[in-house]
Image (cartoon, rainbow, N blue to C red):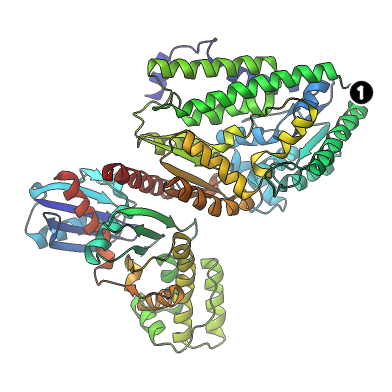
């Protein structure tokens, strides 16, 4: 049946945002492989490392987090996790780390191959487990590690002291990379990258903000797919153009009363936490089949960076969602819930990230209270399929739907 | 108007037939849950008890983990909503329902009209569920009923971990080998379940009155330990295990009206 549907599916429109974004995401890998084949150095890079640095230097990098998500979404998560576990890594640590460390050992995963690195770029503003993960990659592969430390920020603003600390590290990373690779920093090139990164981010954030329309012109799960481009290519011209196309499509959908959410939108929720990549279809279908559209998630907005100069860029990287305090995290999400008319909050308690999941319980409680919406959580994992139960997920989603339904009926 | 609620759980199947969403005509419980002959046995028994047939039923609602695979049902509804409805029908003053079933534990908060306001469920672990008690009763070679009775008469409780069923089993075996009194062990096992579940209740918010539903509500040891852990009396009904089925029949009536 599914094959029949595939046969009749029209070829993708090469002018569509979906096609363009898919091509850019795939090209990030093929460009890196081509660079490797030419004998150029290639890096592995943390997702919230300032991508502007390798982009300005003209260095090809790939993102182990994206690779691990791709491997997990295509069914290889458990296989690679078990390889790392057999080497002694606990199954309590991040599944992205386990998959990446396994890949560094076996150097082949048909679900998503990447060129092996000549250096690794780590920034701990997204998580601290990453430091040990990248240290081990560096040691196992005997390659340099360039590390940027961005401390967790207990305040609302980025202090001058923190800015100075981070700015010095950014320049140190640039100088280390120049020495390692022979590439030279160009202020002119940086301004160009900054301009594209800003254009891409503005279009992306404006596209995600189209969820304010009722019904939303898109299925929130689309954002999870498109996000790959925000991680890997936000400083590129093609990314800016593709994101502007995406924004235009969402505005057009709204004008025409269309949506990529292929069901009647009965309920609108916010999804908290990272996607459950090994169970993406199950988690998406469980919502869609009940008319629940996940209209917003902080995770998508996390990769929109808008800044006006180098210092401002440093500040932006100090304010990524995983590096800020509970109150600011809550306020950002409360705003998203209110702007997008959210009726419920579904929280993914990610077994790969006990630290962030611990934080979530209290934050979600406060969001539920502030927005007067029900909050429901489920156990899962960003990449290890063994930490998810479909029946448990289904019961929780149905319970959330029934609460939202009862509240509508009581109005 | 007759409605039928079918609750297909992980270890048992329960049915209830109501007239006009209130008067209980018959209830049934059969061993065996999803994927067994339990659901058919419970259905046959409840219809026989009510003196009715399937064609007399205006609406049939299924709940429990087997709810999506019940051919006899017109609709399916989560056990969360059903336990809330069933508990509220038995105790209109209830605001917090603690449902401990074979493989999960749920804490449901209700508003003053019996509507579910929110819920918290256990994580992916058997500790704090009925399965934990099954395993421990088997280690002690006593029935579940005897486990509850022994716990209720114990003078103190042995310390038993609530982290993991397998770890706790090893602990219980060691304690047995060390000659610890069987009643104290039973009380420790019940306190372990209660400790784990009381954390869930506190996370959701302890709003009195609190009642227990599900199969574990029959266990007086867990009930007493939970009441102590929460500092609140815990209401129980002899029909606590049937709240899901009764709630499904009430839901069917409201939707079918």
> Could you say where residue B127 lies in the image, as x and y percent from the top left?
48, 65
Q: Which quarter shows the N terminus of chain A?
A: top left
Q: Which quarter shows the C terminus of chain A?
A: top left
Residue A19 lies, with reference to residue A336, above or below; the image says: above
**A140 with respect to A89 (left or right):** right
Q: Pointer 1: residues within 10 angstroms few (<14), some, or many (20+)? A: few
Q: Nearer the viewer, residue A278 or A350?
A: A350
Can residue B37 be seen in this snapshot?
Answer: no
Q: Nearer the viewer, residue A370 or A1?
A: A370
Residue B126 lies, with reference to residue A348, above or below; the image says: below
Can residue A134 be seen in this snapshot?
Answer: yes
> Could you say where residue B190 lies in the image, as x and y percent from the top left?
44, 76
Residue B204 lies, with reference to residue B239, above or below; the image says: above
> Could you say where residue B132 lies in the image, as x and y percent from the top left?
45, 68
**Residue found 15% across the figure and 55% down from its top:** B21
> Could you say where residue A152 lies in the image, as x and y percent from the top left?
72, 47
Q: Quadrant of residue A133?
A: top right
Q: Which residue is denoted by mark 1 in the rendering?
A: A182
Disc 1 is placed on an element classified as: loop
**Residue found 25% across the figure and 60% down from its top:** B86
**A51 with respect to A286 (left or right):** right
**Residue found 40% across the figure and 40% down from its top:** A343
**B145 with respect to B18 (left or right):** right
In which chain is the residue bearing label 1? Answer: A
Q: Nearer the viewer, residue A41 or A186?
A: A186
**A140 with respect to A404 (left or right):** right
Q: Quadrant of residue B24?
A: bottom left
Count numbered badges in the picture: 1
């Amino acid at each position: 049946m599914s094959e029949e549907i595939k046969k009749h599916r029209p070829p993708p429109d090469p002018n569509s945002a979906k096609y363009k974004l898919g091509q850019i995401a795939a090209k990030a890998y093929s460009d890196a492989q081509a660079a490797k084949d030419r004998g150029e150095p290639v890096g592995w890079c943390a997702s919230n490392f300032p991508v502007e640095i390798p982009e300005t230097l003209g260095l090809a990098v790939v993102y182990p987090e994206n690779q691990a998500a791709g491997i997990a979404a295509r069914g290889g998560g458990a296989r690679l996790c078990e390889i790392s576990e057999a080497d002694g890594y606990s199954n309590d640590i991040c599944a992205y780390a386990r998959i990446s460390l396994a890949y560094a050992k076996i150097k082949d995963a048909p679900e998503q191959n990447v060129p092996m690195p000549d250096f690794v770029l780590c920034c701990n503003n997204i998580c601290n487990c990453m430091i040990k993960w990248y240290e081990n990659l560096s040691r196992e592969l005997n390659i340099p590690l360039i590390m940027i430390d961005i401390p967790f920020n207990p305040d609302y603003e980025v202090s001058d002291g923190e800015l100075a600390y981070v700015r010095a590290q950014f320049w140190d990373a640039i100088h280390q990379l120049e020495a390692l690779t022979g590439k030279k920093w160009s202020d002119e090139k940086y301004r160009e990258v900054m301009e594209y990164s800003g254009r891409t981010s503005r279009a992306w954030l404006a596209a995600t903000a189209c969820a304010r329309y009722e019904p939303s012109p898109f299925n929130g799960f689309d954002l999870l797919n498109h996000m790959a481009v925000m991680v890997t290519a936000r400083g590129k011209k093609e990314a800016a153009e593709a994101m502007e196309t995406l924004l235009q499509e969402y505005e057009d959908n709204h004008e025409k009363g269309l949506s990529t959410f292929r069901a009647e939108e009965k309920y609108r929720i916010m999804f908290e936490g990272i996607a459950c990549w090994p169970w993406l279809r199950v988690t998406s279908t469980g919502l869609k089949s009940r008319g629940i559209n996940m209209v917003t998630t902080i995770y998508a907005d996390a990769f929109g960076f808008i800044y006006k100069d180098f210092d401002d860029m440093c500040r932006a990287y100090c304010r990524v969602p995983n590096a800020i305090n509970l109150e600011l995290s809550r306020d950002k999400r409360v705003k998203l819930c209110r702007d997008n008319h959210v009726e419920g909050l579904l929280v993914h308690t990610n077994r790969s990230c006990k630290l962030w999941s611990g934080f979530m319980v209290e934050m979600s409680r406060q969001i539920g209270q502030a927005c007067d919406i029900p909050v429901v959580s489920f156990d899962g994992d960003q990449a290890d399929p063994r930490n998810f139960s479909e029946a448990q997920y289904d019961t929780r989603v149905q319970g959330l739907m029934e609460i939202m339904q009862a509240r509508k009926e009581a109005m | 108007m007759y409605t039928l609620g079918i609750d297909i759980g992980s270890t048992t199947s329960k049915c209830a037939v109501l007239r006009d969403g209130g008067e209980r005509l018959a209830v049934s419980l059969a061993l065996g849950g999803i994927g067994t002959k339990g659901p058919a046995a419970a259905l046959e028994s409840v219809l026989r008890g009510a003196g009715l047939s399937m064609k007399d039923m205006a609406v049939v609602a299924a709940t429990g983990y087997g709810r999506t695979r019940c051919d006899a049902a017109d609709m399916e509804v989560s056990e969360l909503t059903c336990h809330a409805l069933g508990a509220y029908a038995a105790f209109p003053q209830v605001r917090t329902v603690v449902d401990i079933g074979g493989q999960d534990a749920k804490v449901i908060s209700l508003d003053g009209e019996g509507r579910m306001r929110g819920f918290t469920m256990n994580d992916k672990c058997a500790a704090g569920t009925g399965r934990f008690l099954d395993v421990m009763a088997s280690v002690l070679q006593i029935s579940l009923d005897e486990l509850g009775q022994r716990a209720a008469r114990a003078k103190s409780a042995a310390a038993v971990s609530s982290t993991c069923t397998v770890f706790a089993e090893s602990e219980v075996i060691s304690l047995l080998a060390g000659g610890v009194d069987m009643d104290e062990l039973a009380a420790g096992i019940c306190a372990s379940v209660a400790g784990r579940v009381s954390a869930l209740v506190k996370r959701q918010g302890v709003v009195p009155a609190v009642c227990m539903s599900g199969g574990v509500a029959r266990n007086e040891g867990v009930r007493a330990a939970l009441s102590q852990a929460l500092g609140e009396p815990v209401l129980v009904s002899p029909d606590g295990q049937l709240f899901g089925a009764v709630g499904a029949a009430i839901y069917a009536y409201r939707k079918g009206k």
